[in-house]
Image (cartoon, grey):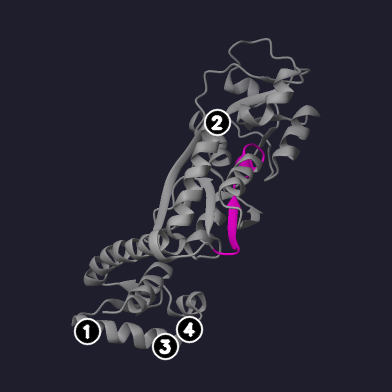
Amino acid sequence: MEFRSLEVFHAVATLRSFARAADTLRMTQSAVSQRIASLEAELGERLLERSSRGALLTPKGEILLHHAERLLKARAELIQAIAAPQPESRLIRLGVAETIAQTWLPSFIGSVNARYSFVTFEIEVDVSANLRSRVVRQEIDLAFLLGKAIEPGITSIDLCSYPLRFVASAALPFPERPVPLEALGRHALISFPKSTVPYRNLQEMFQERSLKVPQIHASSSVSTIIKMTLDRIGICVIAPILIRQELQDGRLVVLETDIVLPTLDFTASFGTVAGGPLMASVAQIAWQTAQQWA
C-alpha cells in the first residue's frame, strides 16, 4: 500500500468530492478514481460511495480514514524531524474572525515570524461560518473561528474565550440597575452579522420572554459597531476586550444586567494531514499569544 494512495483517499474522504480532491492534489479526476479503485481492490473492500451528496465513506472507509490520518501525520512528522530542509518560503492562507483580527492578530504574526522567518501570511477576515466551510474545503490552511470544526480530517485547538456584554455610550441614561431587558429593548441593538451566534441569541432572548424584538443592526466590522455605539445609534453586544480604550477613557460603559450572554469560544482549525507539524506549531503559537491577552 503506497502513501500516495492513502493521501488521495484522505483527500477524497475529507473533501467529499473526487473533483475537489483532484484540484487540491493537482491530479486529473480519472487518476484520483484509479487510485481509489486500486486501493479498494488491494483491500478487497468498498471504501467510498458516490451519491448526490458527494463521495461518502462506507463503514470500512471510516476505519481506513482513522488509520490513514495517523499514518500520514506520523510520516509528515518523521520527514519534518529528520529529512526535511527548511523551506525558503511558506505561504499560510489564514482566515480570521473579526474579534481576533482586532485584538492579538498582529502579535501572533510577529511571534510566528520570529520563530519561522520563512512564513508569510495571506489573511482574510470573515464570519466563522464561512471560515469553517473554507478550512474544511482546504481553501484556507488555518482558521481562527468561533466554535470547533468537527468534520473528518480537521484538527481544532482551543484558543481563548471572551464574554459578551451589553455596552452603551456613557451619554445614554439608564437609571435602573441592573438594566432590565425591557429597557434595553427600547433602544436599537447593534450586533455581529445575522449568521452569527450573538445575533441569533439576541433575537431568541426577546422571543423567549414574549417581548417585541427591537431593531437590530448587524455588521461584520468591529470598528463600525463601536462607532455606531459611540454615536448613540444603539446599544451593542460586544466583548469588552475590543473596547479597552473606550472603556478606559469613559466614552463607553458596560451595562449592568442580569442577562446571561453567550461566551465567544475561539479555536484554531486546520487540516490534520495537510497542515502537518508546521500548522500544529503555528496553532500553538496562536494559543500562547491568546493567553497573553487574557
Image position, residue 209 (x, y; %): 50, 28
Mark 1 is surrounded, within 10 Å at the Cα level, by few (under 14), some (14 to 19) or many (20 or more) other residues, namely few
The quarter of the rendered structure image containing the C terminus is top right
36, 211: nearer the viewer? 36
Vertical relation: 202 (above or below) 45:
above
Query: To which residue does mark 1 refer?
Result: 42
Query: To which residue does mark 4 refer?
Result: 27
Query: To which residue does mark 3 refer?
Result: 31
Image position, residue 120 (x, y; %): 63, 57
Query: To which residue does mark 2 refer?
Result: 292
Whole-Å distance between the Cαs marked 3 and 2? Answer: 48 Å
Q: Residue at x 61, y 53 (%)?
A: 117
Whole-Å distance between the Cαs marked 1 and 2? Answer: 51 Å
Location of residue 118 by image quarter = bottom right
Q: Is residue 210 left or right of residue 157?
A: right
Whole-Å distance between the Cαs marked 3 and 4? Answer: 6 Å
Q: Secondary structure at mark 4?
A: loop
Whole-Å distance between the Cαs marked 4 and 1? Answer: 21 Å
Q: Residue at x 74, y 30 (%)?
A: 229
